[in-house]
Amino acid sequence: MERAFLRSDASYDGVFFVAVRTTGVFCRPSCPARKPRPANVEYFSTPRAALSAGYRPCKRCRPLHTDGRPPEWVERLLGQVDAAPATRLCDADVRKLGIDPARARRYFKRHYGMTFQAYNRARRMGTALHEIRRGADLTRVGLAHGFDSSSGFRDAFARTFGQPPGQARGSDCLVTQMIESPLGPLLACATSEAVCMLEYTDRRALEAQIEALQKRFGCAIVPGSNAPLARLSTELAEYFAGRRRAFTVPIAYPGTPFQQATWRELLRIPYGQTISYEELARRVQRPGAQRAVGMANGRNPIAILIPCHRVVNKNGQLGGYGGGLWRKQKLLDIEHARSA
């Protein structure tokens, strides 16, 4: 536990909580605050135990907060963008909201894989592409999205989508959206037809995963929403509420032939049931390849929908899970409770 805490390892969030005797505060293992001396630290398995011992929750990492909602100031900034996605927000506009631009830049880089300015620009380009695909006039779209000239709009559009706006009427893009959940925020990504990624935002390899996704689909990634993402949000809410056992939203999961074969077998594991890595290897006709199927599990691009959490060790222990063992346990608890 001490090693995980010193590394600020987010995969242990929810597994244990860290209390600091000198401050009287308890935190998540991933808390970014300065680490105390080990002699001043004690560990608890639940927030209730820490509270009963007289500790109060940290205001920075919010250990009692489980719905994945971002801080109030981030919600305010996102609300400003959502209210007028075509509007260009500069640092002065951010300051008028009472928000430090540097703070916004750091937060968005860490949680969204891009700075706030890049997020705002990508959002504008995404809405511009949507209007162009509906047949809108290119010059009008450029002016409406904060560009002073058609040439400036063409250059920015080409940098984002790899082609000028005049050639983009039949093109597609990957749209990303943050989805709140009882397990923390999830970053979803979808084409106009299918969901292609669902991942926990605190995963260390998230940025590399997004880049790989962009290369595989050969199109730009912009924040926003579309039909598959709207359907995904609804079905996830139903799943966590215990009202849904099977997802119907279309999914797309490009990968190596072995990875795809593994992921297809995961989709066949019934709700509320588990199999071992050994059994999974047998089902993909690679008996003895438990480590290989474990690696394929870890690279599953669509968490929860492709249920890699339903694979455990032969002895019944959880094994590994990229989102953290506490999340794997909670997903299994949800399904086992509803199945019973």
Image (cartoon, rainbow, N blue to C red):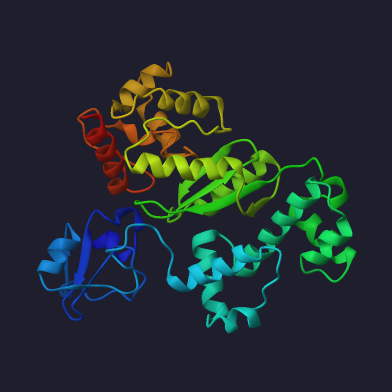
Q: Quadrant of residue 34?
A: bottom left
Q: How many marks?
A: 0
The structure residue drawn at horizontal position 61% and vertical position 54%, both measured from the top left corner, is 224
Q: Quadrant of residue 92?
A: bottom right
Specify whether 154 is left or right of 104.
right
Image: 289 above or below 73: above
The percent position of residue 286, horizontal first and vertical second, equals 41, 19
Is residue 133 placed above or below 260 in the rendered structure?
below
Q: Nearer the viewer, residue 338 or 199?
A: 338
- The quarter of the rendered structure image containing the C terminus is top left
State whether residue 270 appears in this view.
yes
Residue 164 appears in the rendering: no
Residue found 48% across the figure and 39% down from its top = 302
**Where on the picture, by quarter, is residue 296?**
top left
Quadrant position of the N terminus in the picture: bottom left
288 and 119: which one is in front? Answer: 119
Above or below, 13 against 35 in this view is above
Farthest residue to the left: give it: 53
Residue at 27% over, 60% down: 3
Between residue 233 and residue 277, name the one nearer to us.
233
Q: Position of residue 257 (x, y in %)?
A: 55, 25
Vertical side of 304 occupied by 200: above or below: below
Q: Is residue 320 left or right of residue 101?
A: left
Q: Position of residue 71 (x, y in %)?
A: 43, 69
- Determine whether, in the image, residue 312 is placed left or right of residue 90: left
Please report the residue visible at 50 percent of the width from the left and 54 percent of the height from the top: 178
